[in-house]
Image: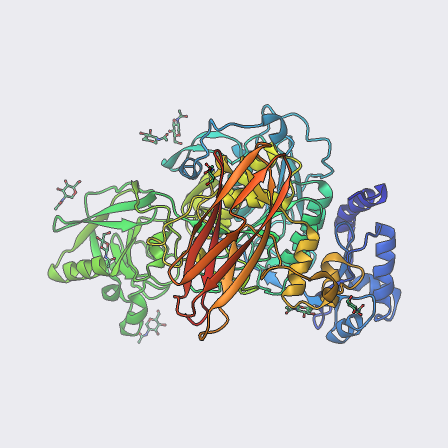
Amino acid sequence: MFRGKGFYASALCFLLFLIGLVGVIGDEQKKFYIIYLGDHPVDKDHATQTHNHLLSSVKGSENDVKESMVHSYHYSLNAFAAKLSEDEAQKLASMDQVLSVIPNQYHKLHTTRSWDFVGLPQIAKRKLKTERDIVVGLIDSGITPQSKSFKDDGFGPPPKKWKGSCGHFANFSGCNNKLIGAKYFKLDRLPDPADILSPVDVSGHGTHTSSTAAGNVVPNASLYGLANGTARGAVPSARVAMYKVCWVSSGCSDMDILAAFDAAAYDGVDVISISIGGVSTNYTTGSISIGAFHAMKKGIITVASAGNDGPSLLSVSNHAPWILTVAASGIDRDFRSRVHLGNGRNISGHGISAFNPGKELYPLISGADAARNASTKEDAMYCSEGSLDPAKVKGRLVYCKLAEAGSESVVKGIGGVGAIIESDQFLDFDVAKIFMAPGTIVNGTIGEFINKYTKSTKTPSAVIYRTRTTKKAPAPFVPLFSSRGPNPGSLHILKPDIAAPGVNILAAFTPLRSLTGLKGDTQFSEFSILSGTSMACPHIAGVAAYVKSFHPAWSPAAIKSAILTTAKPMSRRVNEDGEFAFGVGQVNPTRAVTPGLVYDMDEMSYIQFLCKEGYSGSSLPVLVGPQPINCSKIVPGLGSDALNYPTMQLSLKNKQEPTIGVFRRRVTNVGQAISIYNATIIAPKGVEITVMPMTLSFTRVLQKLSFKVVVKAQPTISMVSTGSLVWKSSRHTVRSPIVIYSPQG
Ligand SMILES: *[C@@H]1O[C@H](CO)[C@@H](O)[C@H](O)[C@H]1NC(C)=O
Ligand SMILES: *[C@@H]1O[C@H](CO)[C@@H](O)[C@H](O)[C@H]1NC(C)=O
Ligand SMILES: *[C@@H]1O[C@H](CO)[C@@H](O)[C@H](O)[C@H]1NC(C)=O
Ligand SMILES: *[C@@H]1O[C@H](CO)[C@@H](O)[C@H](O)[C@H]1NC(C)=O
Ligand SMILES: *[C@@H]1O[C@H](CO)[C@@H](O)[C@H](O)[C@H]1NC(C)=O
Ligand SMILES: *[C@@H]1O[C@H](CO)[C@@H](O)[C@H](O)[C@H]1NC(C)=O
Ligand SMILES: *[C@@H]1O[C@H](CO)[C@@H](O)[C@H](O)[C@H]1NC(C)=O
Ligand SMILES: *[C@@H]1O[C@H](CO)[C@@H](O)[C@H](O)[C@H]1NC(C)=O
Ligand SMILES: *[C@@H]1O[C@H](CO)[C@@H](O)[C@H](O)[C@H]1NC(C)=O
């Protein structure tokens, strides 16, 4: 869609507006709200006028309006943010022009072998000429411009379409031809002494995700020699733009996230990667859902993290159908330390301890035995701050149970050597925790063994050796932390969509934070190891950029379809939640470039879907305004899910009789002009699946052919059953899982 020059100029002003914003809003009774006016194009002057006018109808004076107005969104959507009392918010909400008034909320970040593991070797075929024109935008905690991952040796000027900018900010040396944009948004303007008002990354998260998606090839990267190898993003020749919205103390606010989406769309990014929690299940109220929809309309695909709230079901976030939702998978690598005990026995602990022991053995004491006094004994078992007697801990290793992060830090802080930490939580064994002093995590069985040993001798002793990488099997697996489906926003859409590496990922880090952020940690590194769906998300964002470099004209839905239908199915034996854990399975980047067929969609497809899901026509202009949508006009004759999604999910309606689902789909031929695809169906027990027709014969490129899938499921099936439909030609395999979910199963 073309927008007049005024829009571009106006959005440029928008940054200046941010920087120039003066006058602190001090009224503590008031809260921030986002006021949505629908999506019709407006130029900046007109928008500001309208926004001020609306605001003035609930405010006394011009000065009040000025103080209350926080931000005007006017490029990809028409909305403004303001500081209001509840009364004022309600008054605005009742006005005709106002679609909705939503309180601003704060969200959390979802905290080099990985590319080889999923099959994107460094020598993979590339379209370098177009890859150089791809811009990956990250909405995150900032970036480290001086990192090797973002140096611009060999890069030409930014692509012509680029309208982004990057100034000089506090502690921020500025951009180059690799890092071509950097902005920050902190519209609440509340002070955060732990952060820096600049796009610079003080937490390490944004630096890490950016380098995973599109960082340079950096040989000999490691964390103190661990996980050593070549660090690189999926698209090392692509450009990076950072939109900082996450702040150390406050988190990431809706107002800022929306401003970042608006700016990224204006600047001209191709892909947005956002590893931030979205709590809203309503697709017309969540800032990430709304921002991603407007980005999609501009041809930008949004890739988001599924969340770290697993393994409970229904925990997946960022699940709108226009978002590509990414679960985390673990690769075949583990970090273990050998612990040698004074009785000659060796045991194995988990985590990353980069310290070489200075002695053969250190005296070992159990935390409970090192309590400061009788009343701190309970806390001392956990080595809690203040509970241990420094005299008993000095020069020793301490054995404790895991409480909050950092037992080794407490021990080290009072003169001890380090800690052997016992945990019963299987959660703690998926992720390698980094220690700030010698430390390791053992399970309950081994903990019991150590406990017995310390009681069996007057002089127990032990030593923790430096961590080594080991092989881990079976892989890939979905770690417990990765959020699970089914999708709480719609029982018709399978979420998460796909899995990508998110466990113990090595990528660039910030020099402004020690590796653990714990008091007394003196470890700093250009690269660090982090885990989370936050780390999985930029892997897929990078793959989306990779696919786009081959197919610059493809829609976000086509890119997503290509990535989903070519993924490698994962084992349900290893991952018992099946598709609710891993979606279609593990990403397969090189195959995603030649999918053969794609399931394409435009913005109206999603509106049909929302109508079918029961969204009222009047709630939809936030996405496709300004006029309300007449849902009864749009829906006729569509299948169960009303969407041309590349996966299918049927939710059983009742336990008495079979449930029948009809999925109508249309695939576009993006392979050879003349190609014939045959359907292969796999149906689980208790489910019949039929496809009509069984053969699709294409005679030209971009030809679209429709088919119908009918699924009949007996009421007796287990909670999650999975079948699949695979379209096979002589060259391509196009796979869609068909998930049958029995809510009471
Ligand atoms: C940021 O820059 C200021 C001024 O140059 C300096 O005083 C401060 O130490 C810097 N902060 C960090 C965390 O580097
Ligand atoms: C690789 O890095 C290690 C540790 O950072 C360093 O000791 C070594 O010299 C480096 N090797 C090369 C070839 O640069
Ligand atoms: C990592 O370092 C080890 C020990 O220095 C070396 O043997 C190995 O080849 C390195 N691996 C890579 C991928 O560079
Ligand atoms: C413990 O490991 C060391 C080093 O690998 C080895 O020399 C020793 O024999 C091991 N002890 C036992 C009891 O296996
Ligand atoms: C035990 O030590 C704690 C922490 O130093 C102190 O607050 C508490 O008063 C002590 N209790 C006794 C009974 O000495
Ligand atoms: C505890 O860890 C040891 C060593 O890693 C392993 O052999 C054992 O199976 C684990 N026990 C449990 C209950 O997970
Ligand atoms: C979502 O929120 C909007 C605005 O509050 C409301 O009109 C709509 O009915 C909600 N939709 C669903 C499905 O909850
Ligand atoms: C919506 O469309 C239906 C069918 O065309 C029509 O009967 C109805 O009057 C329309 N409703 C509105 C509010 O326009
Ligand atoms: C598709 O099915 C037809 C008819 O059964 C068969 O002749 C053809 O070889 C099949 N094609 C592929 C690619 O399997």
Is residue 264 depicted above or below 387 in this figure?
above
Q: Position of residue 429 (x, y in %)?
A: 33, 54
Q: Is residue 217 left or right of residue 60?
A: left
Can residue 5 be seen? yes
Q: Which residue is drawn at the image coordinates 70% and 54% (left, top)?
A: 604
524 with respect to 360 (left or right): right
Q: Is residue 744 above or below residue 209?
A: below
- Write down the quadrant of residue 289 in the picture: bottom right
Q: Residue drawn at (38%, 44%), measured in percent from left and top?
A: 331
Q: How many marks?
A: 0
Which corner quadrant of the figure contains ligand 6? bottom left
Could you say where residue 492 lies in the image, as x and y percent from the top left?
55, 62
Of 639 and 513, nearer the camera is 639
In the image, what residue occupies the spot 46% across and 61% down? 740
Q: Locate the N terminus and report the quarter of the image it occupies.
A: top right
Residue 186 seen? no
Residue 628 x/y as whole percent: 78, 64
Q: How is the image coloured?
A: rainbow
Residue 564 pos. (x, y %): 51, 46
Q: Residue furthest top?
A: 154
Q: Nearer the viewer, residue 86 or 304?
A: 304
Q: Quadrant of the C terminus?
A: bottom left
